[in-house]
Amino acid sequence: MNAKTVSEAKKAAEKKKTEKKPQNAAATARRFGVDRLMNVVLAPVVSEKSTFVADKSRQYVFRVADDATKPQIRAAVELMFKIKVEGVTVLNVKGKERRFGRTIGRKRSWKKAYVRLAEGQEINFAATQ
């Protein structure tokens, strides 16, 4: 082998390592476990802002488990609603301080996920029961 073929072989091997292999829903469910995925998405967040975001940019807002990761959220939404997810953005919502008479308390912090769907996909919450 000459130097040119060796370098080409190395480049091809590196390219093969860095390429992401597309996963189907069944493979993802096996990877995370169906019982875990069913406990990741807790509820949809229905507010004025979430409806505006859904209409404008195909994003839906969900309340998710505190220890959920982006790949888990993606897999859970794809499994539950049988749709294709384009991307997931996650943020932590800090609990607000509340007063109960003289006592100052604090609401619980929680995690929110903005799920962007692929072109032509839609979630109908009324029909999924």
Image (tube, helix red, strand yellow):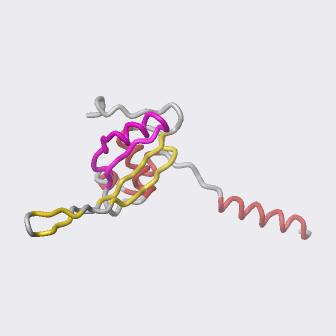
Which residue is pictured at 84% across the width and 68% down the height? 6
How many numbered marks are there? 0
Q: Residue 90: name its quadrant.
A: bottom left
122 inside magenta stretch? no
In depth, the one of 122 and 129 nearer the eye is 122
**Image height check: is 116 above or below 65?**
above
Comparing 105 with 51, the one in front is: 105
Quadrant of residue 46 within the rendered picture: top left
| Residue 28 vertical placement versus 51 (above, below) | below
Q: Depth check: give the residue in front, 117 or 48.
A: 48
Q: Residue 126, image x and y in percent?
A: 28, 30
Q: Which residues are magenta?
A: 41-64
Q: Residue furthest left?
A: 101
Tell me what residue is drawn at x 90 percent, y 66 percent.
Answer: 4
Query: Where on the picture, by quarter, is residue 10?
Result: bottom right
Q: Is residue 68 left or right of residue 16?
A: left
**Residue placed most toward the observer, 67 or 44:** 44
Residue at x-position 25% and y-position 61%: 96
Check if residue 51 falls in the magenta segment: yes
| Residue 34 x/y as whole percent | 33, 51
